[in-house]
Image (cartoon, rainbow, N blue to C red):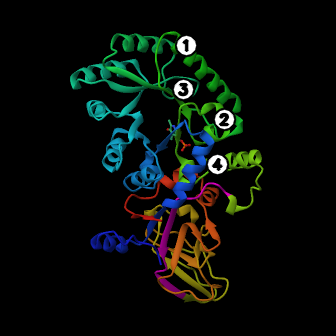
Amino acid sequence: MSYISPTLPEEKKREISFHTSRIELSLSALKKNIKFLQKIIGPRTIFSSVIKGNAYGHNIRTFVPMAEKCGIRHFSVFSAYEGLIAKQSLTQDSHIMVMGDLCASALEWAIENEISFYVFTVGWLEKTVKAAKKVGRPALVHLEVETGMYRTGLNEKELDRAIRIIKSNPEYLIVEGVCTHYAGAESISNYVRVQDQIHRFKETALDLARKGLKIRLWHTACSSAALRYPDTRMDLVRLGIAHYGFWPNKETQMHYFMHNGAPPNKKQIDPLKRVLTWKSRIMNIKDVGKGEFVGYGNSYMTARKQKIASVPIGYFHGFARQLSNRGYVLIQGRRALVVGIVNMNMMMVDVTDFPEVNIGDEVVIIGSQKKQQITVGSFSDMTQFLNYEILVRLPEEIPRVVVP
Ligand SMILES: *Cc1c(COP(=O)(O)O)cnc(C)c1O
């Protein structure tokens, strides 16, 4: 059966066992992903582990110590709240960077705790100076520059004003980095736009250097940019989806295989290993006669005598209702089709041709079992969700368990 670390306190083990499913996080898979990606980005480029969105559904509190075990010392979050959770989860002297919405109430906290953060408005930079004076130490800021995504980022004029503020407050502002984000590096259809952004970023870099700004870290790349555009890697990369073992999209995976000469159809040579496996178990098994409707309504009718198993996972747990009559789970290393409508807490699957199934048998909802695999990707093919979206929809309540 499933692995639960023997070192966990009894009470915690009991609590985990009360849940209808669990999400196992593989330390060895993470280690391999980080090693693979660090090799691509080179030994001198800082690997920032992006853990926004509850570490892409993996859970910040569980994931941060795992990543630190794999040598990560830099984490990127979106909000102050995520920064706080990350900070509480550190087991090493790692650095935290807020890439998005650091709220006003968290500004002093960030400065006190040496948490760096993006600045994308002049007003915010002024507020930062005030807060740094109050705290009595410099703020570590990353200037986000506009290069053509038009989301957040300082344009040329704003950048000039920012430089003036920085130069007149050297004891309160340390520009740790200058950064930008690409508007879709995972898709070749954005090629021209991304190239244009790279070009604009380099121009800005030259300009800032000319104006006498000293910057330690230039950074622009997310997973797909780091994988597809080598000159985006610079001093630091912000890697999310790839280090969890997922390609940003199929296209980026094929791009990698095309440029590295490996046959793309052999799963075993995929250098990215899924860190996460979502598991449940069979709750009930029923023999149903021919011509009966299964579950709510009449969306599924048995075509013969069938064996139907129920699994205590439903849309409450993040299993999309759109997967009714279409999704699959793994039982005994074989795919079992979801039959009928996905309920709030349960779904039914067809196990008619499974030689010997029993109540309590393991059910894999995402991940591998024996030689079969259900990827988040196959979920996204059947729903309109991105793999990113499916991961972050995994509810926080489902226990995360670290496995070797
Ligand atoms: C989410 C995010 C990343 C990481 O993106 P992935 O595609 O998951 O690697 C990098 N930079 C910023 C600014 C982000 O918001």
The amino acid on which the numbered mark 3 sits, given as a three-letter code, is Tyr
Q: Are marks 1 and 2 in contact (CB under 8 Å)?
A: no
Classify residue 231 as left or right of residue 63: right
Q: Nearer the viewer, mark 3 or mark 4?
A: 4
User: Could you classify mark 1 by the number of other residues whose Cα lies within 10 Å: few (under 14), some (14-19), or many (20 or more)?
Assistant: few
Q: Residues within 10 Å of mark 4 (few under 14, many from 20)?
A: some
- Which residue has dot 4 on it? 249
Specify the amino acid type for callout 2: Tyr
Query: Which type of secondary structure does the marked residue at label 1 adopt?
Result: helix
Answer whether residue 386 is visible to the viewer in this image: no
Q: Which residue is mark 3?
A: 150
Report the amino acid beneath label 4.
Answer: Asn
The yes-or-no answer for disc 4 within 8 Å of ligand 1 is no
Q: Residue at x 37, y 72 (%)?
A: 6
Q: Depth-wise, is mark 2 or mark 3 nearer the camera?
A: 2
Q: Please give the residue where the numbered disc 2 appears in the rendered image.
A: 229
User: Foreground: 51 or 283?
Assistant: 51
Query: Can you tell which mark lies on residue 207?
Result: 1
Q: Which of the marked residues, 4 or 2, is nearer the chain's N terminus?
A: 2
Mark 3 and ligand 1: say if the CB distance to the nearest ligand atom is below 8 Å.
no
Q: Secondary structure at mark 3?
A: loop
Q: What are the residue bounds of the magenta stretch?
A: 270-286
Query: How far across and how far down the image is residue 309, in percent?
Result: 53, 81
- Please report whichever mark, 3 or 4, sits nearer to the chain's N-terminal start: 3
